[in-house]
Image (spheres, rainbow, N blue to C red):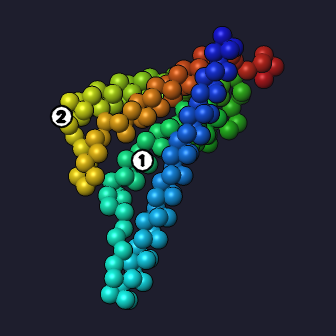
Amino acid sequence: MARAVVLLDRAAALWALAGGGLLLGVVAITMANVAAVAADRVAGLFGASVSAISGYEELVGLLVGAGAFMLLPYCQLRRGHVVVDLLLRHARPRIRHAVDRTCAGLFAVAAALLAVMLARGAMEGAEDGIASRVLALPDWPFQVPAVLSLALWGLVAARLCLGPPPPADA
């Protein structure tokens, strides 16, 4: 069991690193597009033109959507989500732990349902041949990382929900 927990934690960390790499790629594409726009302005002074990246907005939207989802499991693992603990700040550790476990359980259920719905939507999109307008890229491959992210997020949240309680003296 402990080995499975370690593997799940590592998977969440590696998945977040991959998502971060994807988002760094978005930054690189954005920098290239900004450079092309700036070069076009300069070239315009001499009667020439430089084209920006065709379909830039579409590509960035698809990549950011996938990359952002990839960060969620690690965020859940590190309890990095936004938490409003005005009421629980002064509560006993066991009460806080019970609330944390309950919320983690709700996250697990929500992530599982979202994963199923997004997977169905991706399959329907693939069957219908839905593609982006400018680049004509199919949408469904960009939804696969989101589906996997939601599934991993659900597993991490379930692990936290079923985790051990705090020590008896807490």
User: Which one is in front, 47 or 64?
Assistant: 47
Q: Which residue is mark 1?
A: 63
Q: Quadrant of the C terminus?
A: top right
Number of residues whose C-alpha sits closer than 10 Å to that of mark 1, classed few (under 14), some (14–19) or many (20 or more) = some
User: Which one is in front, 21 or 100?
Assistant: 21
Mark pair 1, 2: CA separation: 21 Å
Q: Amino acid at mark 2?
A: Asp
Residue at image position (24%, 34%) is 125
Q: What is the quadrant of residue 55 in the picture?
A: bottom left
Residue at image position (64%, 27%) is 10
Rendered location of residue 54, percent (x, y): 32, 61
In this rendering, the answer to whether 170 lies above or below 139 is above
Q: Secondary structure at mark 2?
A: helix
In this rendering, the answer to whether 75 lies above or below 161 is below
Q: Amino acid at mark 1?
A: Leu
Residue at image position (60%, 16%) is 162
Circle on res. 160: none
Q: What is the quadrant of residue 140 in the picture?
A: top left
Q: Residue furthest left?
A: 128
In this rendering, the answer to whether 154 lies above or below 21 is above
Tell me: 129 left or right of 41.
left
Rendered location of residue 16, percent (x, y): 57, 38
Q: What is the quadrant of residue 131 in the picture?
A: top left
In this rendering, the answer to whether 60 lies above or below 102 is below
- Is residue 95 something that shows in the picture? no
Number of residues whose C-alpha sits closer than 10 Å to that of mark 2, classed few (under 14), some (14–19) or many (20 or more) = few
